[in-house]
Amino acid sequence: MVWFIFALLTALFASLKDLFSKKGLDKIDEYVLAFSLRTFALLFTLPLLFFIEIPKLGSQFWIALVVGGSLNIVTTILYLKALKASDMSISVPMITFTPLFLLIMSPILVGEFPSFFGIIGILFIVFGAYILKIRETSEGYLTPFKALLKEKGPRYMLIVAFIWSITSNFDKIGILNSSSNFWNISIQFFIVVFMFPILLLKSPDKAYQVPNNLRAIVPLGIFVCLMRIFQMIAIRLSLVAYVISIKRTSAVMTVLFGCLILKEKGIKERLTGVVLMIIGVLFILLF
């Protein structure tokens, strides 16, 4: 059960990252926060270099690093844009659509088709998304889906979920061609280096926000660092499917944080929707 504790800690720090990001966006530009979050996460992760052996790099390492790193830059920015645009409790649960996109892409990429339980999981996820906007049904039963796609936050997060269904493959390639810790440090370094020009282009006059908001930014870096470390430990101790399933409970924690701390409304229908979506994820990942 030790792996379960580490997996649950992964979910907790993922949810805390969302909470502090949402609060930080009130005072910090999303591009500044995206760069700062990744930079401090890298700084707190770098000491691992003193405790790990530098692996021999495989032939596909650099391809995985460039493609995976570039896509992660996009998801980091879009993730914060989603949090800034809409309530945290309705944006973050959209990440549970990643298994749905994987089920769609897997037959194309590797010839794998959904099982009976996979189809059940898809139905749970779709219905859970419907429940998130159930208050809109007075204007028609398809209105929740329309409203979900009209809001920038959920729409951005759906894009993030789709891109994550691609980057997970490159993460696997990167780890197989190096090691889990070295890959983690390498891709973080790539993201920080190539996100800096984007920061200069999009928010050149807002760098002052970093020293003025260190109390909000530093914890974010710590949360991201710990989230990744605990996830690596949990994966080493147990099956990846189990760890990821537990990590997805961060969506439920995020809804609770959003409603209890940020005073976002609609906790009943949103939490119900998230629970249904996570049940769908469990069906897909465990069966």
Image (cartoon, rainbow, N blue to C red):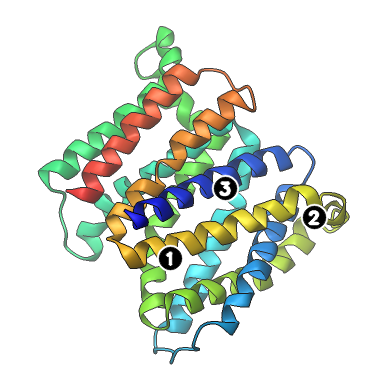
* Distance in Å between CA atoms under marks 2 and 1: 34 Å
Secondary structure type for disc 1: helix
Q: Which amino acid does label 1 sit on?
A: Met
Could you say where residue 283 lies in the image, as x and y percent from the top left?
A: 22, 42
Query: For the residue carrying disc 2, how many other residues have a C-alpha within 10 Å: few (<14), some (14-19), or many (20+)?
Result: some
Q: Residue at 69% of width from left, 52% of height from top?
A: 219
Place of residue 47 in the rendered image (x, y in percent of width and height, measured from the top left): 63, 76
Circle 2: residue type: Ser
- As drawn, the label of residue 232 is 1
Which circle marks residue 79 in the picture? 3
Q: Is residue 203 visible?
A: yes
Taking the image as shown, residue 112 lies to the left or right of residue 6, namely left
- Amino acid type at image mark 3: Tyr
Is the residue 2 above or below the residue 68 in the image? Answer: above
Chain-order first, disc 2 or disc 3: 3
Q: Give the residue displayed 11% in from the left and 42% down from the top.
A: 116
Q: Single out the mark in the foreground, 1 or 3.
A: 1
First along the sequence among labels 1 and 3 = 3
Residue marked by disc 2: 203
Q: Which residue is drawn at 23% across and 33% down?
A: 123
